[in-house]
Image (spheres, rainbow, N blue to C red):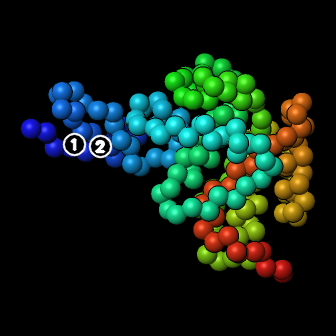
């Protein structure tokens, strides 16, 4: 006789499900509310290891991932962000037991600055000037958190170029990882004003 699944909320507010194995022990939690790789790994929730795909993915220069909702795009971006985070015990613990730690550990030694934008936090509804203002504000916040100079009057395209250049100067590789998530409509463009 199998026991029913249980659902509960963690201290982070995430919904989790648990099942019971036929032998009577509980199975790992299935977290359905988060797409943040470190949170999932720290909680001990089920994580489908997609790190074998990363070496091939990172061999190119840029990608646009267009998949259906709930396909794991945000989790993949969060995993990439963790791959390039500062080396140390925290990074080692996050990737312990995953393919990348065993088969491609050299990839985990790279530390690169990350410019991560989540378009779901921007004002996309108004378009045009409001979108520009919202994007400019998000980029300024990133610059401030990374202790980079901010010119309040610099136009958005110049500001993006300056920000990426400044971030690139912080490493010997002169590279920046740019991650953009939740672009609901890939065809939108800035209107000229």
Q: Which quadrant holds residue 131?
A: bottom right
The quadrant of the picture occupied by the C terminus is bottom right
Dot 1 alpha-carbon crowd within 10 angstroms: few under 14, some 14 to 19, many 20 or more: few
Dot 1 corresponds to which residue?
6
Residue 66: horizontal and vertical position, in percent? 62, 62
Residue sitting nearer the eye, 115 or 74: 74
Residue 8, can we see it? no
Asked if residue 1 lies left or right of residue 183, the reply is: left
- Checking the image for residue 17, the label placed there is 2
Name the secondary structure under disc 1: strand
Answer left or right for 39 relative to 178.
left
- Between the residue at mark 2 and the residue at mark 1, the CA separation in whole angstroms equals 6 Å
- Residue at 74% x, 67% y is 133
Q: Can you give x and y, in whole percent of width and height, for residue 189 in the image?
A: 75, 74
Between 124 and 184, the one lying in front of the other is: 184
Image marks 2 and 1: residues in contact by CB distance under 8 Å: yes
Residue 153, label in figure: none
What's the residue at 70%, 64% (across, down)?
134
């Amino acid at each position: 006789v199998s026991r029913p699944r249980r659902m509960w909320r963690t201290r982070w507010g995430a919904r989790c499900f648990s099942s019971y194995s036929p032998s009577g022990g509980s199975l790992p939690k299935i977290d359905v509310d988060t797409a943040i790789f470190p949170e999932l790994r720290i909680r001990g929730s089920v994580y489908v290891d997609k790190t074998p795909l990363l070496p091939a993915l990172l061999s190119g220069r840029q990608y646009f991932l267009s998949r259906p909702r709930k396909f794991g795009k945000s989790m993949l971006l969060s995993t990439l962000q963790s791959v390039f985070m500062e080396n140390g015990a925290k990074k080692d613990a996050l990737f312990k037991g995953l393919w990348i730690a065993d088969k491609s550990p050299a990839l985990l030694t790279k530390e690169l600055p990350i410019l991560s934008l989540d378009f779901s936090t921007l004002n996309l509804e108004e378009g045009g000037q409001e979108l520009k203002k919202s994007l400019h504000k998000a980029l300024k916040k990133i610059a401030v958190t990374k202790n980079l100079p901010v010119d309040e009057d610099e136009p958005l395209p110049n500001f993006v170029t300056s920000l990426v250049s400044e971030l690139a100067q912080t490493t010997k590789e002169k590279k920046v990882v740019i991650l953009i998530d939740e672009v609901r409509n890939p065809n939108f463009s800035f209107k000229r004003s």
